[in-house]
Image (tube, grey):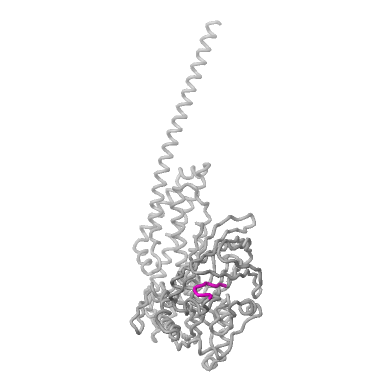
Amino acid sequence: MPKHDIAQQHRRKKSVRFWVIGALAIVLVLIATAAAAGMMLYKQAQAVKNHEMNALSVLQSRGDMTVQAKDLKAKLPQMQSEAKKADTLAHGTLWNIAAKMPIVGKDVGTVQGMTTVVSDIMDETLPQLVSLADALQNANLRSPDGGLNLKPIVDTTPAVQQLDTLVHRQIKEYNALAAPKLDAVAAPYQKGKALLDEFGVQVEAVNDTFSVLPTLLGENQVQTYAVMAMTTSEMRSSGGLIGSVGQLTTHNGTIEVGQFRPNAEYLQYGIGDHSEDEKRIFTDEGPLNMSFDIRDLAVFTDTARAASAMRSIWDRTPWGGQTPINGVLMIDPVFVQELIAVNGNVTLSDGTVLTGDNTAQFLLNEIYKKYPIEQTDMVFAEVAAQVIHSMFADASFNQLSRIADVLHTMAEERHLSIYSFNEQQEQIIQKAGFTAQPPRDETHPAVGIYLTEQNPSKMGWYLKRSAKIQSLGCNATGECTYHVEYTLTNTITEQEAKDLTWYITGNNPDNTGKAQEKILFYPPAGGEISNLVLLNGAAGDIKLDVLNGDKIYKTYLQLVPGQQAIYSFDVTTAPSAKAKLVIDQTPLGTAGTDVVYE
């Protein structure tokens, strides 16, 4: 090979080596740069998380908006700064590049969306809350005649509605973000979601209560309600046996609680109006035949039906003939307990002190061990009258916000239900969620599960109920599917069944200590229940039926002491559903729904 060719080949090899070395150097530089960028991104991510959690920490106060508003006013500038820092970091160059990368890109986008929503809440929403709280704290909420001054409430209602709309729009934006897969993002995302959801519930409670209070408390007109005191230890679909009925009169914020009469005084005035379906399902089919007298008026799953039946009896009584009712309130011991937690303890004539912790258990169980049978209903009536009368005794925004929280939660759980015979007023009450009814709203899907005790007893206290709901996903048309397991457990022991009074355990020796339940299952509005089976426990046929135009499944269940039964079924919601599936059920003997999402 000629010398010049050898030299040229040598130069080419040197050139190739040079470019290989150069390329390797560039790759190493890129790797080093990427590593440095990754480290910087990681450090920034930690800073974003800290700023975000610091900002959201101001929402942790729950149940007392006065404390929360004062806390907000002091901390708001700092929280706004924290949220702004998080948002600025999350939208920097590194983050914008990372948002376009595979695998981590979606999670980075979620973080960017989170910081934007939280920054908007700090800049838009919380200043409105502070302003609203200031206005109500400075307002005179006590009327000259000792009632609740409704004018400040009416005046601020539009602002509360605007705040509620804004909060739920921001929560919707947050929830629409892609669920993060990386643990480092998922944890703060879930914590932020929980805090925002709780805040949304709190604002919604105030909004709902403010919209209903003027109607309930007789703004510019006298309102008379029949207060139906339900003993949920003897369950009926909407609550429990009606032990007594009182008269509640309101006018421009004043509350006057009239006499509570025991159910025995109503029996001579006949039964309440009812449909053929209701007669067939609740009376003819037994085994306990509902009479539709005053005691059974909570057997209807719909408060409107219970109210209509109540009025038909009320109008036949001497006192009702003189004073027509404008509506009804259905209340139970859990509702009374929650009011006592707000208003203060109640001391009975024998020295028994009822508190925000022990009232429900006392009125649903202990009372039957301590007092003669004929006195039990009137003890409940006495306590209920006292706490309702003092509901707004404090007349401060602090108490009002706490009452709003109680009313909203108790209505959701069916411990309280209100119905007005005035169509326009009832629309307001129903829209705010204070009229219990079986599933009617396609956008907020619910499964209705309603129990009526078939063993005349007070066994409802011992029947514990819980539910597990597992989301199975949604299809292209928007229909979502869930799997539900609904568990019922008879917690009374065999020894208790032998030792306790027959008034608690049942007066039939063959059924002592048994929980005997007629159960109705309602599918969600526009949706379906399928594969409904009893996994264990006593056998019972499950039949498809129709009740007042609603498709239902009905069954009868018996549980001996210590026995458990689990109903398993799938649920498909309507395509228009906008929220997760919930359980609407006969109220429990405690606050809360005992529903777990998996």
- The quarter holding residue 449 reads bottom right
Does residue 248 appear in the picture of this structure? yes
Most foreground residue, 564 or 190: 564
Q: Position of residue 454 (x, y in %)?
A: 56, 76
Does residue 428 appear in the picture of this structure? no
Q: Position of residue 261 (x, y in %)?
A: 48, 88
Establish if 266 lies above or below 586: below
Q: Position of residue 316 (x, y in %)?
A: 57, 91
Q: Is residue 483 left or right of residue 387?
A: right
Q: Is residue 513 magenta?
A: yes
The quadrant of the image that shows the N terminus is top right
Q: Position of residue 197 (x, y in %)?
A: 47, 61
Q: How many marks?
A: 0
Residue shown at 40% from the left, 68% from the top? 63
Establish if 547 lies above or below 97: below
Q: Is residue 390 magenta?
A: no
Most foreground residue, 159 or 455: 455
Range of residues picked out in magenta: 510-517
Establish if 122 lies above or below 46: below
Which residue ends up furthest to the top in the rendered image? 2
Residue shown at 50% from the left, 65% from the top? 466
Residue shown at 48% from the left, 81% from the top? 229
